[in-house]
Amino acid sequence: METPTKSNKFNSGYIALTLTSILWGTTWVASKVAVTQLPGLQLAYIRQFIAGSLFLGFFTFIKKQPLPSWKDFKFMFVMAILMFVMANGFSSWGLKFIPTGLASLIGALSPLSVVVIERFFYKQKNVSVLTYVGLCIGILGVGFVFYHNMFSTIDGNLILGLILSILAMLAWSVGTIFLSRHSIGINPYYAMGWQMMLGAFMLFFLAPLLQKTIPLNEINGKSWLAILYLIGIGSIISFIAFIYSLKKLPTAISSLYAYINPIVAMLVAALILKENLTTSIVIGTIVTLIGVYIVNHSIKRDQEKIIVEAEI
């Protein structure tokens, strides 16, 4: 029988998990709102610069953390390119052209691509039959989601949005693999602040080359509210709740947010943005997430490792 203390710990962990699942799901919608006016890459570097400044300021001036070593800096530079320039930047850019729910579902495919990348590029041998079953189910689910658009006009913007979202998801997957194969000698949250800041500076110079950016004083109040929401809710509160749930709950449970986020994103987008939510999209989403769950379950069983989805 569980002691009251242990029960309270689990209850607080589930509360944190619920917050993570819902709030991180809504950040896809907030990003969609922001990119209606802002170019996606500009949105990404503004968000990353402010959030990165907060993280770096806290660990530098309050926690008195030293500067990272050259080895750690090189690691963070690579991670900044993968996670913040490509994964976050490209996914924000792609949201301009595709529905919110579809973008979040593509992000949820990260565990599937990690398995494929490790199998073919790192010659991972211990891939079980159950993992392949999950991969097939996940691909089938994506097919259901795309079925809605099969007989409609597919224009260049839709294709561009899909390409950017897939590249973002693949970059997150490569970053996940890179992170699992390298260690870093500083606090991971301090490192994340550095990665955000490095990503922001790279995107600052890259954005004008690929998109027409707008002056800061021309950004409307609606977009600024979305940016502040992404920083406060997406980059700080949700992340703290996620870390708390990791401490209080088993990894297999705390990672369940990855299967809830796309559903939250689709429902909120349908309610607020009036995005179309058809039966084929709902069925495809559920089937896809079942496939992702099976892949993660098989990896957990065979390797004691859980792969979570990308966050925008």
Image: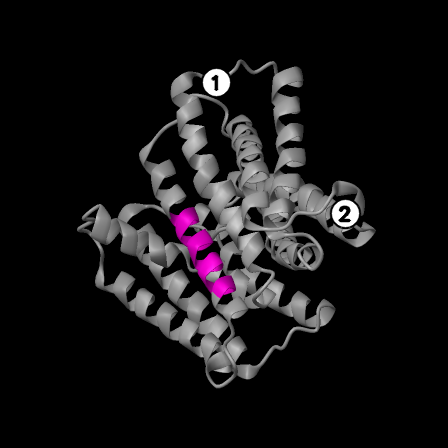
Mark toward the start of the polypeptide (2 vs 1): 1
Tell me the SS state at disc 2.
Answer: helix
* Prevailing secondary structure class for the magenta stretch in the rendered image: helix
Residue at position x 54%, y 76% from top? Answer: 282
Verify whether residue 137 appears in magenta. Answer: no
Tell me the SS state at disc 1.
Answer: loop
Name the residue type under label 2.
Answer: Trp
> Foreground residue, 18 or 190?
190
Residue at position x 23%, y 53% from top? Answer: 119
Residue at position x 76%, y 47% from top? Answer: 224
Residue at position x 28%, y 47% from top? Answer: 303
Q: Is residue 146 left or right of residue 116?
A: right
Image x and y of residue 140, in percent: 37, 75
Q: Is residue 254 left or right of residue 212?
A: left
Name the residue type under label 1.
Answer: Pro
> Foreground residue, 3 or 106?
106
Which label number is shown at residue 166? none
Image x and y of residue 271, in percent: 71, 71
Label 1: which residue? 68
Verify whether residue 171 appears in magenta. Answer: yes
Q: Residues within 10 Å of mark 1 (few under 14, many from 20)?
A: some
Label 2: which residue? 224
- Rendered image quadrant of residue 100: bottom right
Image x and y of residue 144, in percent: 44, 78
Which residues fall within the magenta stretch?
160-173
Distance CA(mark 2)–CA(mark 1): 32 Å
Answer yes or no: is residue 12 visible. Answer: no
